[in-house]
Each structure stands twice: as structure tokens, then as C-alpha cells.
Amino acid sequence: MKRVNRILGLVFGGLVLMAVAPVMAESNLCFNSSFSSTNDPFEGWGLDYDWSGNSKQMGNHKNASFLPEFKGRSNVLKMAIPAGYESKVETPIMEYEPGARYKCTFDLYADIGGMRVLFLGYALAPGVPPDDLPKFSDLRRIYKGDAQDASGASWKSMTVIFPKEEISELAYKHLKKVRYMTVMMFVPGATFGAGTFCISNVKVVKLPGKCKVLKSALK
Amino acid sequence: MAPVMLIGQLVKVGRMLNRWSAEVRFTVGMSVILFILESMAATDIMLRFQRGGRVVAWGLLVILVGVLVERLFRVLSRRPSPELVAVSVERTFPQLDNHLINFLLFSASGRKDPFTAAYLKMDIPHWSGLDFRAMKDLRTLRRAQIALGVALVMTLVPYPLVGQAWPVAMGRIINPFSNVAPVSLTHILSTAPGNSSALQGGNVAVSCQAKGKAGHEVWLDVRSADGTAKTYNLGALKGRGVEGFSNTFFKVTTAMQYRFRAGDSFSPDWYAISLRPPLAFTSISVKVVPPSYMAIPPRQYDAQAAAIDVPAGSVVSFEVHCNTPVPGIALAGFGSSVALSRKGDDKVWEGSVIVTNGSGFVLSATAANGDPAETTLGYNLMLDRPPTLTIKYPKQSVVLLPGGAPSIDFAVSDDFGLDEITVEQVLDSEDKTAPATVLKTYKWVTSKTREYTALWKGEIRKTTDSGNLTLRVVAKDNRPGVKNVTLSSSLVFTLDEAAVAAKKQEEAAKKTLEDLNRVIELQRENITRTRQLQGILNTSAPDQWMEAGARQEAIRGIVRQVMEKGGGRSLGNLLGTVRKLYATEMAEVIPALQGVPGVKEAAQKVKQVGRALSMEEKILRQLTFAEEAAKRALDDSKNNSLIGILDGIIGQQDKIIKATGLCMTQGMAVAASVTADQDSLGSEVSAFIKACLAAAAAGQGEDKDNAAFLVSIAQGCEKDKIGGDMLLAAEQLEKNAPAVAMPHEQNAYSKLLAVRKKFDEATALADKEKEMEMVEALKEASAKLAKLKAMEEKLKDAMDKVEENKDKNSKKTDKLEEEAEEIKKNIKEALQEIPKDLDIFAHLNVGNDLVEDVFSTFEEVTQEEGSENASAGGPVAEKAVVKREMLAEGMEKVKGLLDDFEMWLGKKPDATKITAEAADKQEMPEGVALTPLQTEMNDIIGDLLKQDKEEAKKADDGAINAAVPDLEMGGEVKEGDTTSFSAKGKSGNTEPDHKEQDGRSNIGRQGMANGESAAASGTIGKGDDNIEARRTQDPTQSGQVTADGEADTKATGGGKLGSGKGDGWGDGGGTTRMDSTEKGSGEQSLAMMAKRADSTYAQASMKGMRSDSLKNAAHHLRQAEDAVSKGAPIGEIAEWKRKAMAELKKAKTELGEGSAASLDGRNSTSLVNDIVEASPDEAPAKYRGLVSEYYKKLNESL
């Protein structure tokens, strides 16, 4: 009986390993996704929007803080949201492979409603030469993925995918110009009051296959 | 013995005893004093008393002496009683056995008893033999004398031991007020500077002279005011007589005390050095009083803080305050020098000067202690400059035909006011001092006019006038005494005959054409050679490229000559284009060609040659257009001279009719001049007929139709006997019969008008033909684009087929590929043809100026399930909104461009019908303030959400008539119940509501009919196909959109003007904007003016006239309109209006030249200079007010 159990255990373990292996093989495309950089826990992350000159985003980085532990999660980015302010966070800039699809998963804790999470597609701003490490100010937003709404004062697992499996010709016209991408989490300040949100365990992986372009009814 | 005698003897004894006692006391006192003196002197030798110590010691001695004297006096003045003396005597001489006492007592008691009497009668035993000297205390006296002797000896004993120091010490104690120093081996002889003051921050040198024993050191003790003390060792004496020691303290900032010490020399007193601040001017107050004629109010300055403006000739008053008294202050630097005078104490000085030159005042003073102070106060000398005279017309020599009047358009300005302007006729055009005849004087008596502009018109030229009419304008300012005078250059009006003038013009035009032909040929040749060189790029020699560059230089030189001749008028409307070409490509291609050999990398070399060739081709293309424009200009102006003569005759005839009418009604005699004029006018009609025939003969070979037309005109004039009517009228006028003359005059006048009408009809016909040509060409282009679209579809199919058959049948694939290639080739050719077709209108250079960077972001949206129809999404909700009065209020206010939050597209279509209560018209503001447009605009676009058509229609919101300049955008993109003019709206993912006809949009979806499209390029998304177009005929409105073919641009009346890259043509947006059409508003009038200027410009363009100024005027009017909308400062608005007005005036002159009597006769170089100088020059902010005031006056004068 013991032998049978051992064999069954091995078989079960093998099956589990086979199931998990592809996932384990997926590499996380997001740099410093666990805020573990020794230089700066937020290295690469899009927090400082002072360069935009938009008064609604000035000082955004001052609302960010790093928490080693928070309600059962380690290495957490906490964003304070002053009332009437638009707190936002973008993952480090990642290169986008034309036509490819990506998935981002992360844990979110938000004590305020109306959060939006989405992929953003960027092209280089006019006059900016291609660079291995473009800055946020070098990019021009030309594509926005399907946004997910989030709220609830407890840790939740979030998933956003970019782009959709099937996109229109109009969408494709923009998508084919996308060179870089990020995942943005923000709380629209125009609508909501003060609060905080936290994120942890960010992971961006590439999905198999490419998106399909639907024939558009447009002329 | 009688008692009296006894008492007398006792008194004597008592006195003797007193003397002896005084002697003892004196001796003892002196001894004590001497001992103390000696001990003090000894102490001084050892301790070297300061003066204080010496005074104390001296004081002690003085007290002792005082005590001694007092004691002696007391002893000597004592009167001892006889009894007391008797007691002393009894004590000294016991043998008296109290007899003496008894005797005295009995005698004093007065008793008369016998015993007493008997006792008194007895002699005192032993009395007579007494030696009273025995009563002297010799022992004490002797001791005292011994002490005194010792004390005296002691005054001498130390001398052999300490030498001179002993008597010096004794002297120092006896006289503490003497400056005798203690005797030492080393002496400090002198110290400098003693008690003194030093300049704060300066250096202080202290020194001493010392003499003494070799090896003795010299020290300097210093105590500064901040409490620190220090001793410096200055070295040792060498024993060679008087030696000097010194030390310097640098940059002394605190007061201090010092003293020198040397060896065993007595330490001298401390010397103090106090600090004094440097001499400075604590305040300088300057008052500038300009000369009265300048009308500038006096102004007070703090000269140390502010820049001083000094109009030349001003009285400048000074009041200078110093921190320390000074004996005097000198003022210089303005071409002269004066001394200021004292005001109150020596610290305050004043004075005034008249300033006519220089650039800075120099104030200098020296304090009593020698401290100097000097300061320079710069000032801006505002000179009274000569008046600035600008001649706007004529810019060069012009031909004045009979009937025409010379005119001068000039502007004069002076910094402080004008006195007189004269228009003068001179005989010698070169000599400015030649005597002149004043034709017109503009004189100011009391006015402070600083700017003046006028259009002067002279007498009409008569047919008999010939030669040159040389005029000049002289302007004088209001400076008292010798006035500043500005003379214009000679303005020459050539009084050629019409035929000669016409011929000259024709020759000039032909020469231009020849030059252009030549230059075009040269350009073609150079392109060919450049291509050849391109073929042998690797083997080509540097000289060959240099040669190509030199040819381009020659081409540029010829073009420059063409532009300069006659002010470039012969180039027609393409003058602006050619000027731009001259300044850019024609200049750039030369170094591009000559620099080819210098490029090392092959790829770069190829690129540079390509760039040079491209520029050469552009030059050729533009020059070809220029040639075409020159031909048109020649063609269009061919009859201008004749029209000018005719207009002059008509004008004169009109005057004669009026004069005749006046004579008729007033019963006056006809003036001889009227008769002469009428007679002369008949001759001018004959001259006009001759000119028509001459022009017809000249143009016979090239334009037979026009020649025939002119012949018909000449024949018509002869047939109608216009000249005859005039002669008949002249005869009747001569007979003083104005009533009889009048019908003849009016006949001639009406016939002349008929002739003028014929010229207008001929011109109109030609214009109409051109318009027709243009419309035809546009239609053709449109048709070609449609064909291209079809071909594109075909190509797409062919490519798909190629793709499908790729792996199946190679032959079929090849054939399909060939087919596709053929279609591609056809498309390419057809596309090349379109711009070629449209380029024939290149000389109609109307266009849009607005440029905006617009980019769109696509957003994915998953539509909410069932939201597309009513059954699932629920019925359309209706929402009523009461009128928002604050919106109407806000329409006039601009807070600047507001920043926005993140925006996104909604997941379900609009299912709310909003009906907003309209604001009352009375509540509406006069105008709407517009925010400046963003330089960069991010549009958000997405796939259209599906929606039931009926539902969409139901959800259309009501129209809104109130809006705000800007909104703080954020959140979901959707139709709201407010609108703004900030052009921030996003295209979104829903079809536009039917009511969207307000504000300013960017691009939006097809069908949006917003007030004005702000974008210069962008993508038009699919929208409402059925919305009405708001068509206008004016294509000059801003907001040209480069559509990328996703949707038709039809029905986009709100300013969207589709470009050639789109798949259709949009409509012009109209000149008047939705946001600026309130009746009576300033903006409305500006918009109307702009529209009129546009319209006139278009007409002038079609007529081949040079009228760029009109285009500029319209542009400036729109800028003024925008400035009003933005609530810009009045100065800015005035600036734009001023520019517009200047351009309109210029245009007026230009257009006047086109049809009136002025023809180009000589060369001018002004236009090439304009290429550099033509950039807009806004007045500096500080002069804006002045400039606007000037143009306000100018405005009034028009």
C-alpha cells in the first residue's frame, strides 16, 4: 500500500510539475517588479510627472512610499491620494513586440473606489531618437488597453491584458506604431476623495500568439 | 615778688617750653617724611610707579607735611596757664617745694588774711637761681635729631648705589606731575603715531625709536577692542645709538590700543587707535527738469538706485549727503565741471547743472583727513533727434500720366513734437539745398504732435506738362532755436507721354520675361549638369561642383535683378514666393553643390547631391510659375495706363461740370481757367485716342483680341465725338454761357463713362474665364482622385490575389504581380498629375496659417453588454438643466488654459438626452474670451460603440447657447451639458450629437460641425453621415485637416478643410466664428474687416495685382480679433490693429498703382532688403502704450 501511495504521489507530483513548469518558465518582463532594487525601491517606475507641467500631476512622486510589509504582503508600493488629486503609478517602461499580447497580474489594495488599471502603448515623441532606455518624457501615448475598474479595502488579485485578442483596423493603425508599454494604475482625482492604494507582486508576461485584426466597417 | 611779675615770668617759661616741644615735633616729623619719601623713591626704583602711584605717594607726603605743620602751629600757638607752667617748673625743680604753686594760688584766691598776705610777701625760695633750660627734653630732642640725621643721610646713601635713578625717583615722587621717566639702561625715545585714528579696513603702521643696551628686546603690546591681546617681539637692540622698530596691522577692522616696551625701559602709556569709516555719499538725490518744449514732467531720482533719464538740455539738480563732513564736492562728467555748494553743515551739498551731452556724472570729494570718495552716476541722455520721415509712396520714380495727380504718402514722427512739415518742389533733384517752392505746409502752433501721417495730393498733371516733377518732404521739429530738420530723398514723378510710359512699361516687362526665360534655361542646364555629375559622383572633380555652384550664384544674381526692377511688380503675385525662394533655396543650394566634394562618406555625398538637386528642381518649378505670373501681370496690366488716362479725364470733366453748374446756379461768370481746362481736356481725349491706337499697334502681334478692343475704343471715341463735345462746351464757356455748355459737358462725361465701362467689362470677362478654369481644374482633380481610389481598390484586390496564388502557380502569380505593378505605376502617374494640374493656381497663394500638433490615442473599450439598444439598456433618460448664469458670466473671463485630468472612453453609448435652459440673449456677454490653444493636443479615439439609431437620435441633447472659455477636462469622454471654446474635446467613441455646432473643435468625427477646427492635421473618424454641411465659399479660415482616409470630410463645415491626402474635399469653415458673432461686438467688426480684406485680396489676386499687404492685413485683423477674445492688454490689440492699418494703407497704394496712373520707371533696391527686414517687429513692451497712442491718432487721421 505504501508503495502504491508513493507511486501515486510521484505521478501527482509530476503532473503538478508539468502544469506549473510553463508558468514558471514565463519570465517577468517588468523590471524591479518587486521594488527590490538596491538603488531605489521605485527604480524605473513612473511616479514623477513633474516634467509634464500638468498641475494635476505635480508632486505625484511625493505621495509614494515603500512598505516592507503591509497586511500580509511584502515589498509594497503605497500611494497616498489627496482629495481632488490624481495619484497614478506606471510600471517601468517595457518594450512592446509588434502584435504580441501581454498580461499583467498584481495584488491591489485600495481603500477608495473608482481605480482604473490598464496597459498603455507608447511611441517615441516627435524628434526623440530611439534609445534603449527612453524616459517617460520621451514617449507619446498612442494606445490605451481595455481598462479594469478596481476597489475594495482588501488585497485583490488584478489582471489586465493588452491588447484584446481581436482588434479593429482602427485600433491596429495605432497599435502598429506602439514601441513601448507600461501598466498604469490611477485614481481619477476629479471624482473621488482622499484615500490610499497599494500594489505588490507585479508581474508582466507575454502571452502566446498575436492579436487578430478584424475587418472594419469603416470606409 | 609781685604775683604779676611771677606770672609774667611763667608765661615766658611757657612759651619757651612750646618752642622746645615744636622743635622736637618738627624734627620727628621731618624724619618721618624723609623716611617715607625715601622709601617711596626706593619703591619707585623697584616698581616704577605709574603716574597714579606717584600721585598717591606724593599725596601721602603732602598729608604728612600738612599734619606736621598743623601740629607745629598748634604747639606754637598754645597758651599754657601760669599754674600749668608752675606745675611743670615745680616738677623740674623740686627745691621750690610747692612755694611757687602756693604763691600763685594764694595770690589768685584774693584772700586778705594775714597768713596769705604774709605768704605772699615772702620770696619764693630758690626762684631766682633757677635755670629753666633744665626743663628742655634734651633726650627726646636728641633722639629726634638723630632720626632726622639718619633720614638725611639716607637721602644720600642710595646715590652711590643706584646713581641718578635715586634723585630721579625722589623727584618723580616729589613731583608726580613731571614726565621724568625712571632711569633705565634702555629707553624708548618716541612712539608713532601715538593716539590716532585709522581708516576702517585700512592699514595701520606703528613705530618707535629706542636706544639702550645691546641685546635688550623690543616688544609691541596690542589690545584690540574685541578683547583680544597680543604681544609682538620686534627684535633686539644692537646698542648702536637710536634704533627704530615698527609693525603694520593690515585691514584693521576694530579699534585698538598699543604700546612699545624695550629692555628695562619704563613701560609707557597705552596709545589708542580708533577707526573711522571711509568717506562716502550716503544719499544722492537728483531732480531732472526737462526743457519745457519737451512736455516731460520733472522727475526725482535716487541716483544711487535708479537709472537716470536726462533729456538733452535738462536742468539737473543734486543734493548730496556725506557720512562725514567734507570741505567741498566737485561734480563733473557732463562736459563741464562745477563745485557743489554747502547746504547746512559740511555733510550736505547741493548744486544744479544743465546737461546737453555726456553719459555719467562724476561726484568727487576729499575729507579733511585725506580720505577720498568718488562715484559715477550713469545717465541716459535722451537727445532730441531729427524727425523720422518715412515715405510710403512713392518708393521709387513713378510715371505721372496726364490726368493724374502726384501723391505722397508719408509719415513723420519726432520724439518731442513736430513744428512744421512742408511738401516742396525742387528744380534740382540732387541738390538738397536748392531753392524750393512750397506746395503744402502742415504747421503746428500749440499742439504737441509727435506723429503725423498724411496722404498729400498735388495738382492734376496737364497734357502739356513734361519733364520731371521733383518733390520732397521737409519735416522740422519743435526744438527751440535751431530746429532739427529732416529732408526726404527726391521724389521724382516722370511726366512722360502715355504712349512713352506704356512703351517703357512694356519694355520692362519684356525684359523681365527675357530674364526669367534666361534664368529658367540656366536652371534647366544646371539641373542637367548636376544630374550628369551625380552619375559620375565618384570620379567627378571638385571644380565641376564649384562650377555648378557658381552657375547657381549667377542664377540668383539675375533673379535679384528681376526683383529689383520696378520693385518686382512685373512678377505679379509670385513676388512673395520668389523673394522667399531667393532667401532660402537659392542661397542654400550654392554651398550644397560646392560642398559635395568635401563630404567624405559616400552615402552622405549621395544624400547631399540629392538634396541639392531637389532644391534646384524646386527653384526651376517656382521660376516657371514666376514666368507664368509675369506673363499674367503683363497681360493684366496692359491696359492699366490707358485706364489711368481715362480715369484722369473723367475726373477732370466731373470737376468742370461741377464748376459750370455752380456758375449756372450762382449766376457767376465762368472763370477763364475752366474754359482753358475744358479746351485742354479735349486735347487730352485726342491724346488718349492716339495712345489706344499706339498700344493696339504695339500688341498686334501678341494679343490681337486686345488690340482689336483698343482700336474699337479709339474708333468709338472718335465716332462719339467726345473731343468735339468738349470743344463745343469750351466755346460756350468762353462766351460765358454755362447753361449752353452744360449739355455738351454732360454728353462728353457720359460717353467717357461708357468707354470706362467697356474696359471694366473686358477685365471682368478675363477674370471670369480664370475662375472657370480654376473650378474646372478642381473638378478634374477630384475626378482623378476618385479614379485613383478605384485603382487603389483594384490594386488591393490584385495584391490579395498575388498572396493567395503565391504557392500555387508561379506563372499566374507573375502575371498578377505584373498587373499589380502596372496599376501601381498608373496610380503614381495619376498622383503626379494632380499636383501638376493644381499647380497652375500656384499664384493664388491663399492658405492657412494655424499649426497645431495633434496626435490621437486609440483606446480599447469593451462595450457593456446590451447597451446598444433600448430594451437592454433601458429607455433614454431625459435630464433637464436649468440655465447656468455663471456660465454666461464666465464666457467673458479667461483664467488661462486649465490643466486636465486623465480621460477615457465610456463603455456604453450616450443614453441621456440633456436639455439645458438657454441663457437669455440679453444676458449674453458682448464677446467670448478665448483661451490660447494648446500647442499639443491629445485626441482620444476608439471604435464606435454600437447603438440603435433611433436611440441615438432620441439621446441627442438640446442646443446650448452658453459656454465657458475652458473646462477642466477629466473622466469619461462624452457629450455634456456645457461646452467650451478651448478645443480640448476628444473624438471619443460615439457619434456626435446633431447639436454639436458650438465651441472650437480639434478634428473629431465626420459630421461634427463645431465652430472652428483648431487642428492643422489629424484624423477624422467616422461619424454622423447625415448632419448638414455648413458651406461657405471662403477657404481661408484656419483649421486645415489632413485626413488619412478613414472617413469622408464632407459636411464638416466647422472649419475642416480636407487636404489632398484625404479621400474627399471638405468645405471651408467661413470667416465668422460661432463664438464671435454677437452683433455690435468689436470682434465682429474685426472679423468682418478680415473677411473683406480676404475678399479684396482674392479679387486682386485674380486680377494679377500685387497685394500681399491685403493678406497681411487680414492676418493682423484676425490677430487683433483673437487678442480681444483673449482679453489681451489694450496695447497688444492696438498693436495688431496698427499693423493691419499699415498693411491696408500699403495695399491701398499698391492697388492704386495697379489701375491708376503710376507706372514703374526706374529701379529700386528696397525689396531685396525687405527679405531681411520683413520680420514682424513688435514694439518693446515699454513702448507699447506710446505706439498705441500714436496709432490711435493715425486711426483718427484716416
Image (cartoon, helix red, strand yellow):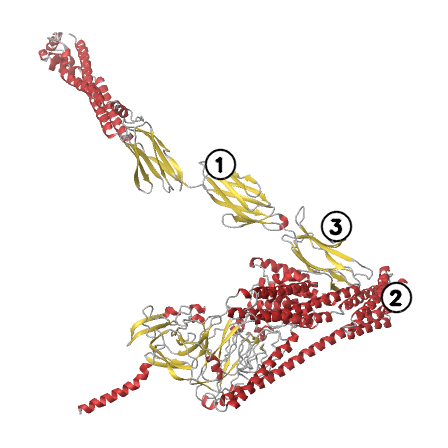
Q: Quadrant of residue B725?
A: bottom right
User: Height in image: B791 above or below B965?
Assistant: below
Q: Chain of mark 3?
A: B
Place of residue B1080 in the rendered image (x, y in percent of width and height, measured from the top left)? 63, 71
Amino acid at pointer 2: Leu
- Decide: few, some or many residues near mark 1? Use Cα within 10 Å; few <14, some 14-19, many ≥20: few
Q: Residues within 10 Å of mark 3 (few under 14, many from 20)?
A: few
Give the residue at x 71% y 70%.
B633
> For the residues marked 2 and 3, what is the alpha-carbon distance in whole angstroms?
41 Å
Where does the image place residue B634, in percent across and percent down from the top left?
Answer: 73, 69
Query: Residue at label 2?
Result: B727
Q: Are marks 3 and 1 in contact (CB under 8 Å)?
A: no
Q: Please tell me which residue lies in front, B1197 or B886.
A: B1197
Q: Residue at x 24, y 30 (%)?
A: B47
Secondary element under disc 3, as helix, strand or loop, is loop
Pointer 1 residue: B327
Gap between marks 3 and 1, in whole Å?
A: 59 Å
Which disc, if any, is residue B434?
3
Front disc: 1 or 2: 2
Give whichever of B510, B19 is nearer the camera: B510
Whether marks 1 and 2 lie on the same chain: yes
Kind of residue indicated by mark 1: Pro
Horizontal side of B94 relative to B591 (left or right) equals: left
Given the current orientation, which residue lies at the most extreme front position? B539
Q: Nearer the viewer, mark 3 or mark 1?
A: 3
Which secondary structure lies at badge 2? helix
Q: Disc 2 is attached to a residue of which chain?
A: B
First along the sequence among labels 2 and 3: 3
At numbered mark 1, what does the secondary structure look like: helix, strand or loop? loop
As drawn, is B469 to the left or to the right of B108? right
